[in-house]
Amino acid sequence: MAAIQLSGVTKTYGDVAALRGIDLTVERGEVFGFLGPNGAGKSTTIDILLRYTHPTDGRVEVLGHDVATDPVAVRRETGVLPEGFAPFETMTGRQHVEYAIEANAADDDPDELLERVDVAHAADRLATGYSKGMAQRLTLATALVGEPDLLILDEPSTGLDPHGVRTMREIVREECDRGATVFFSSHILEQVEAVADRVGILSDGQLLTVDTIDGLRDGVGATGELTVTLEPDAAGPTESTGSPGGTATATAPGSRSEAAGSSTRGSDQRAPANPSQRSVADPVAVVEAIDGVEAVRRHGDELIVTCRREAKLGVLDELRDAGLAIHDFTTEETSLEDLFVSYTEGER
Ligand SMILES: Nc1ncnc2c1ncn2[C@@H]1O[C@H](COP(=O)(O)OP(=O)(O)OP(=O)(O)O)[C@@H](O)[C@H]1O
């Protein structure tokens, strides 16, 4: 049984089509990031999942319950961090958590929960005096009450400082590790990238794609960068630049400085003095022959390879097979932010 199942869900507000036929399955135990530009329909979807609003058409199941007929069961088993929650005027932080514990007939220790979200020091203060980030942490504490099977978090990182963002990330992972499903919307894409198993990108009420982040990269044919440091003198003291087919090498977005990418010195300009080294394979030639490699630059012992994600292992294998010993390597992938722009910019 899926944690969330939306089938043909539409929602219109007068003339505005907020959702246009959404089909989405979120499996149990997943951390699912729900992304989309402003006004895409993320909050509307969340409101529909919790039956705060009803869909114009379509079917919604949460944790096996039909949301239309059993919204109480859905809310009982779901912890919610709503967007823009305002604390109650007369209650301290601890009283908010105690209230949530009582309402859920749970037996959590309120101080433990406040400790977990890092507002224990302000437990006895009126929560209306909390800063935005403290209020957000408090709301998360109330969402965690009763170890819910599903957490629905609408923009959970809003107002959080970097420590808070990290705490949020750790809590999401811990909740997932104990078996909960986490469904969260966010505009902080580094956060989503760090924690989500899969993401869905919504735009103008339509789901453009649902995939893992690597799947999104493959979907747009994104290239990343692989920097390989060869053992000193493994391939002779040359610098060269190449690309498959012999075309000029372009500097990839996010790659190192233009200056580093501009070398076009030929590999025979400084032939090794030792004749035995002449038989060593040229690493640039080895790498540029590999499928999925777009460009190769070499600076001393370092090779900077622009290639498709799936080509990276092949680059390392081919270098080793050619007798070129690898000292170290690092890889850099297209960021989720760039992927988000690729998927949504034509839609706006
Ligand atoms: N109560 C409402 N009445 C009229 N239109 C609404 C209402 N709620 C949402 N909408 C419209 O539905 C569309 C989707 O809004 P929604 O709040 O779901 O977007 P969102 O993806 O959550 O945006 P954001 O990232 O800005 O929070 C928007 O065009 C919005 O103006």
Image (spheres, rainbow, N blue to C red):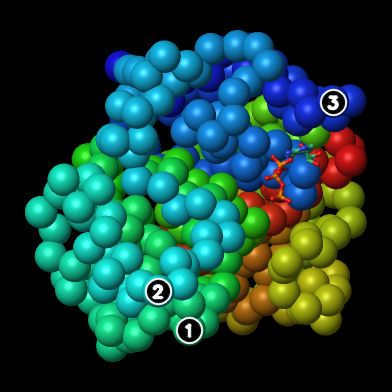
Other-residue count near label 2 (Cα within 10 Å), few / some / many at <14 / 14–19 / ≥20: few
Residue 107 shows which numbered tag? none
Locate residue 127: give its quadrant: bottom left
Earlier along the polypeptide chain: callout 2 or callout 3?
3
The image shows residue 33, relative to residue 99, as above or below, that is: above
Q: Quadrant of the N terminus?
A: top left
Nearest the eye: 82 or 331: 82
- x 27%, y 59%: residue: 99
Type of the residue with mark 2: Thr
Please tell me which of labels 1 and 2 falls first in the chain: 2
Give above or below for 204 relative to 264.
above
Report the Cα–Cα distance between label 2 and label 3.
Answer: 38 Å
Residue toward you, 93 or 180: 93
How crowded pointer 3 is (Cα within 10 Å; few <14, some 14-19, many 20+) is rated as few
Dot 3 or dot 1: first in sequence order is: 3
In the image, which is nearer the foreground, mark 1 or mark 2?
Answer: 2
Residue 197 visible at all: yes
* Viewer-side label of 2, 3: 2
Judging by the rendered image, the residue that carries numbered circle 3 is: 14
Q: Residue furthest front?
A: 90
Quadrant, the C terminus: top right
Q: Which mark is residue 90?
A: 2
| Residue closer to the observer: 270 or 4 | 4
Quarter of the rendered image showing ligand 1: top right
Q: Is residue 313 visible?
A: no
Q: Which mark is residue 129?
A: 1
Few, some or many residues within 10 Å of mark 1 (<14, 14–19, 20+)? some
Q: Is mark 3 within 8 Å of ligand 1?
A: yes
Q: Position of residue 297 (x, y in %)?
A: 72, 65
